[in-house]
Amino acid sequence: MSASTKVPVSELPDLLLPAFVDTLIMVGIVMTIVVLVGIPLGAVLHNLAPGGLFENPVLHTPLSWTVSVGRSLPFLILMASIMPFTRFITGTNIGIPAAVVPMSLAGIAFFTRIVENSLRSVPPSVVAVARASGGSNAQIIRTAQLSEAVPSIIGGLTINTIAMIEYSAIAGTIGAGGIGYVAVTYGYQRFDHTVMIATIVILVATVAVVQLVGDALVRFTTPHSRARVAA
């Protein structure tokens, strides 16, 4: 590969900054969808299970299996297998819109299970007190189950966000834009090691920041941590 085809170091910011913004937009849109769908779906799944507020095995079993299937498929296979559906929804199989569809489906399946498992950790006594006070199912879910599970849900949300950053890099293979697209197009296909290293550094730094923020939020929302801060 001729050196003339490589990106000059001075031009790296012009190449990487727009790609980084595309990655943030992609992940931001996906995580908004994931939270809006995953939290209520996880709460419903938990409460349809035996011992839940409105247990219903007939509904719980197929819903749980659907979530499990969504979690079990490798993202690249999921992305390729639903391309007709993606084109139907977005009108295209390339670009950020085409990446948002499979990323959202994968993220929702993952986060739904995280929310379900987080709600399982809520002590039954908390739910019993809420029931005794005459709260409706919706009130119990909101004020007892979800509020008690906030630290665990935030921890899971952090993991999910990091996974979506990784998936956004994979989505670069379908021309979705972002850091992954730059890494594949410039770093891999053109054998430009400088670009490849730069994209790796950006991805690692982004993941580290997300993890730090997530850990801080978990500590802040954990009751005994709040008590120490107040003291």
Image (cartoon, rainbow, N blue to C red):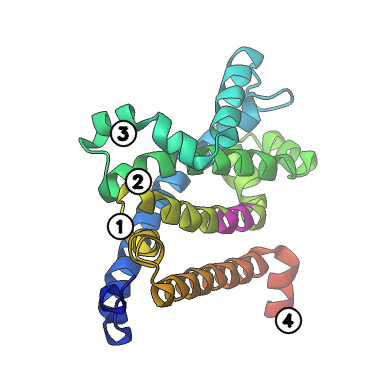
The percent position of residue 33, horizontal first and vertical second, equals 40, 45
Mark 2–mark 1 Cα distance, whole angstroms, equals 9 Å
Between 48 and 18, the residue placed more toward the observer is: 18
Q: From the viewer's perspective, is the residue at label 3 or at label 1 nearer?
A: 1
Separation of disc 3 and disc 2 at Cα? 8 Å
Q: Secondary structure at mark 4?
A: loop
Instruction: Identify the residue position indicated by label 1 in the image.
Output: 177
Q: Which percent across, then down, holds residue 145?
A: 65, 43
Where disc 1 sits, the SS reads: loop
The crowding category of the residue bearing disc 2, from other C-alpha atoms within 10 Å (few below 14, some 14 to 19, many at least 20), is many
Instruction: Note whether 231 is above or below 207 in the view shown.
Output: below
Give the amino acid type for the residue marked by disc 1 in the picture: Gly
Q: Specify the label residue 86 is tagged with.
A: 3
Along the viewing direction, whichever of 211 and 96 lies nearer the viewer? 96
**Magenta-colored span:** 153-159
What label does residue 99 carry, if any? 2
Q: Which residue is mark 4?
A: 231
| Left or right side of 53 for 78 | left
- Determine whether, in the image, residue 178 is placed left or right of residue 65: left
- Report the amino acid beneath label 2: Ala
Q: Earlier in the sequence, mark 2 or mark 4?
A: 2
Locate residue 98: give its quadrant: top left
